[in-house]
Image (spheres, rainbow, N blue to C red):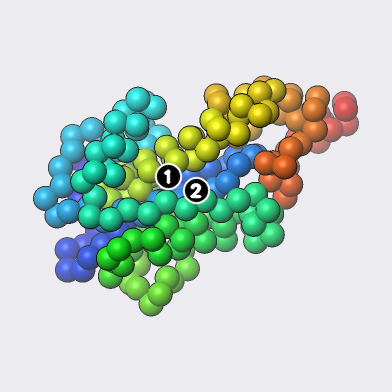
Amino acid sequence: MLKLQYQNQLIECGTDEAGRGCLAGPVTAAAVILPLNFKNELLNDSKKLSERNRILLREVIQKEALAYGVAHVMMEEIDKINILNASILAMHRAISRLKPLPEFIAVDGHKFKPYADLQHQCVIKGDAKYMNIAAASILAKTARDAYMQKIAKAYPAYDWHQNKGYPTKKHRKAILENGSTAYHRQSFKLLPEQLKMEF
C-alpha cells in the first residue's frame, strides 16, 4: 500500500514526468495535491497499470484532487535545453498551475531544481511509494498518450498510436524509410549507427 505523501506538516504536491525516453513528442509532467483523507486501492505507478485503469484513475484524480496541473515541454525546447532540463521545466510548469501553490514538493527521481523557494525532496521510484507522485505519473502519462494519439493520425507510418513515440523497431524502421518529422527530437539518436549506414 502506498503512503499518501512524503511528510505531513506542509501542503504537499507530488510531481512526475512521462516521455523522457521517447524519440518523438513532448515530455509531459503533472503535479497533484491530494486531500489528506484520499484513499484508492488501485492507485500505483502508472507503468504498472493497464491503459484502462490509468484512464479510470485519471477521472478519479481530476475529480478528487485539491489541485492538479499538467504541462508539456515540446520538441524544440527539448533540443535546446536537453531532456533532463526539459523534464524539470515541465514539472515546474505543472506546479505553477496549482492553486493553492504547495509548500512542499515530492519529486519522482533523483534530479530537480528548486522551484519558487519551496522545499522539495527527490524520491527514487517515488511513483511506487507515494500516492501524490503516483497520481502525477498517471496524469502525465495519460495527457502525453492523448497528445501522441492525436498527432499519430497525421503520421500513421510511425505507429505513434501504439508506441507513443518510444524507440520500437517499427518506429525506427519508419524513420529509416520516411525520415524524421517536426515532432521528432533532433537532439536524440533517432537511428542506431548500423541502420544509418545501411540507408
Q: Residue at x 61, y 26 (%)?
A: 153
For numbered disc 2, what is the local secondary structure? strand
| Occupied quadrant, residue 12 | bottom left
Is residue 137 depicted above or below 173 in this figure? below
Marks 2 and 1 close (CB-CB < 8 Å) = yes
Pinpoint residue 48: horizontal percent, then vertical percent: 36, 32
| Occupied quadrant, residue 142 | top left
Question: Which residue is at the front of the view, 116 or 126?
Answer: 116
Question: Which residue is at the front of the view, 79 or 113?
Answer: 79
Is residue 119 depicted above or below 44 in this figure? below
Amino acid type, mark 2:
Thr
Q: Is residue 151 left or right of residue 107?
A: right
Q: Is residue 105 left or right of residue 166?
A: left
Q: Residue at x 32, y 53 (%)?
A: 68
Q: Name the residue tied to disc 1.
A: 140
Residue 52 seen in render: yes
Residue 192 seen in render: no
Pinpoint residue 85: horizontal percent, then vertical percent: 57, 61
Pinpoint residue 118: horizontal percent, then vertical percent: 35, 73
Disc assigned to residue 28: 2
CA distance separating discs 2 and 1:
6 Å
Amino acid type, mark 1:
Ala
Q: Residues within 10 Å of mark 1 (few under 14, many from 20)?
A: many
Q: Residue at x 32, y 50 (%)?
A: 133
The C terminus: image quadrant = top right
Question: Which residue is at the front of the view, 183 or 83?
Answer: 183
Q: Residue at x 63, y 54 (%)?
A: 78
